[in-house]
Image (spheres, rainbow, N blue to C red):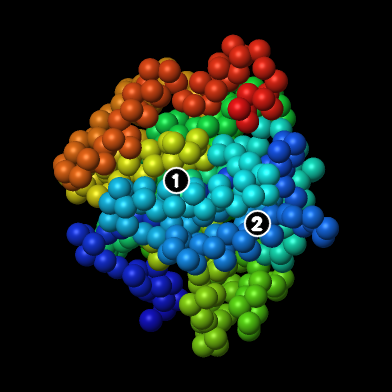
């Protein structure tokens, strides 16, 4: 077995049957004090994000609620258990909300579900005192322009789907990569930056596009174009990416001597020192909009207001769980010209459905087409899961994405931004 096959076997190590596929969700949010200040992450003398994380972690063990972690600017991330239907996921989400609200209320804190911090310059936000994030910060300063914004001032929703087999992995990742402009429009909620409206700028999407030229953006941007051998091409791609850190013998991140992911993995593979944890750490250093772990992960969704958090789950599940929809999308996307796709990806940085899309249709046409297929797929499942997307989609089509809606409501309110955001 060569190195590529070894990495592939890790990605495909948790295959499930089609009927057993599940979805999990990761939700990030910002934490503020009642005085509208971001909760510090490294405070020595007062309650901080580290204390909050420990309290969440301790209490989550009582109810099989999932797990918690901290992002580099102190954003709290909740990772759900995986479920085969969205109703069960919703029950888990409500348990999470009850727990975090109870703890935040006890400490006079507020959570904010939004894609980009509306107020703070990242220079004013402390970086968590963890080696991994310190090395990541250094790397992103070399390889992009907005890494500090991404690490300290963005929050997202991420989805994880089980893999059936290699062909399934190839086809779903290709479909999801083609869907990026649609997802970026439907689930945009980053209306303010440094206390000013962003207008039609799709801000969090823009930040991620300019975070790290090696490890962000779409698969298409890294030459991964076709579904037939996508996983193999993905492995070849990640081997060329600069390595941020490696794991020591105790599985702790440390500064690395290797230039690329491939250099490290090949060296350890040839000396028979390669551990599954080394592969996992390498895969987690890739931040493309769609990426592989031992699952398929979707990463291009802004954190949304709490009541809408399951809308993207429903949208993608109506596609991923429906074989007929996947076939329709695969057939359609395979016809698209590469340059058209690249131009459309750039169009997703602006919230305007009047822009041209691929194959002679408008951005609007493709958003509606994909959404209607998803709704059909949810109805085919016969579990009533379309309720999590139907109203949301109707609202977005009628009134524009939440980014634009929020700005319009703010301008009409005549309130201060702080009062508007936290009321």
- Number of other residues with Cα within 10 Å of mark 2, as a class: few under 14, some 14 to 19, many 20 or more: many
- Left or right of 353? Residue 111 is right
130 or 281: nearer the viewer: 130
Q: Nearer the viewer, mark 2 or mark 1?
A: 2
Mark 2 / mark 1, whichever is N-terminal: 2
Q: Which residue carries the number 1 mark?
A: 220
Q: 182 above or below 75?
A: above
Residue at 55% over, 39% down: 113
Among the 4 quarters of the image, the one containing residue 421: top right
Residue at 75% over, 36% down: 35
Q: Residue furthest right?
A: 45
Among the 4 quarters of the image, the one containing residue 395: top left
- Left or right of 339? Residue 422 is right
110 or 328: nearer the viewer: 110
Residue 172 in sight: no
Residue 320 in sight: yes
| Residue 254 pos. (x, y %) | 70, 72
Q: Residue furthest front?
A: 106
| Residue 308 pos. (x, y %) | 43, 36
Q: Which residue carries the number 2 mark?
A: 52
| Residue 341 pos. (x, y %) | 41, 35
Q: Residue furthest bottom?
A: 272
- Number of other residues with Cα within 10 Å of mark 1, as a class: few under 14, some 14 to 19, many 20 or more: some
- Quadrant (top left/top right/bottom left/bottom right) for the N terminus: bottom left
């Amino acid at each position: 077995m060569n190195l590529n096959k070894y990495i592939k076997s890790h990605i495909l190590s948790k295959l499930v049957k089609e009927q057993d596929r599940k979805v999990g969700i990761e939700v990030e949010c910002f934490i503020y004090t009642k005085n509208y200040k971001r909760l510090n992450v490294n405070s020595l003398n007062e309650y901080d994000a580290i204390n909050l994380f420990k309290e969440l972690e301790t209490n989550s063990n009582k109810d099989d609620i999932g797990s918690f972690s901290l992002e580099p600017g102190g954003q709290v991330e909740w990772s759900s258990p995986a479920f085969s239907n969205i109703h069960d996921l919703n029950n888990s989400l409500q348990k999470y909300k009850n727990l975090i609200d109870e703890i935040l209320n006890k400490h006079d804190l507020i959570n904010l579900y939004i894609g980009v911090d509306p107020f703070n310059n990242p220079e004013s936000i402390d970086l968590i005192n963890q080696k991994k994030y310190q090395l990541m910060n250094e790397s992103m300063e070399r390889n992009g322009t907005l890494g500090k914004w991404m690490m300290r001032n963005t929050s997202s929703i991420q989805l994880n789907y089980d893999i059936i087999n290699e062909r399934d992995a190839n086809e779903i990742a290709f479909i999801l990569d083609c869907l990026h402009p649609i997802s970026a429009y439907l689930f945009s909620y980053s209306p303010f930056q440094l206390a000013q409206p962003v207008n039609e700028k799709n801000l969090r999407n823009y930040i991620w596009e300019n975070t790290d030229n090696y490890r962000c953006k779409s698969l298409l941007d890294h030459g991964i174009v076709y579904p037939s051998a996508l996983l193999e091409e993905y492995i070849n791609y990640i081997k060329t990416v600069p390595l941020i850190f490696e794991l020591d013998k105790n599985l702790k991140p440390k500064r690395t001597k290797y230039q690329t992911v491939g250099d490290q993995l090949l060296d350890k593979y040839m000396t028979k020192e390669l551990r599954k944890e080394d592969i996992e750490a390498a895969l987690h250093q890739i931040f493309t909009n769609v990426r592989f772990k031992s699952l398929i992960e979707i990463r291009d969704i802004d954190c949304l207001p709490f009541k809408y958090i399951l809308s993207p789950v429903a949208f993608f599940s109506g596609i991923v769980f429906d074989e007929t929809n996947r076939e329709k999308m695969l057939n359609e996307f395979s016809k698209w010209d590469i340059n058209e796709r690249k131009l459309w990806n750039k169009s997703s940085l602006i919230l305007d459905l009047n822009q041209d899309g691929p194959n002679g249709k408008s951005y609007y046409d493709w958003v509606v087409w994909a959404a209607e297929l998803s709704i059909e797929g949810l109805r085919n499942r016969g579990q009533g899961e379309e309720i999590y997307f139907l109203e949301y989609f109707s609202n977005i089509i009628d009134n524009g994405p939440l980014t634009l809606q929020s700005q319009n409501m703010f301008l009409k309110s005549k309130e201060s931004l702080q009062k508007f955001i936290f009321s």
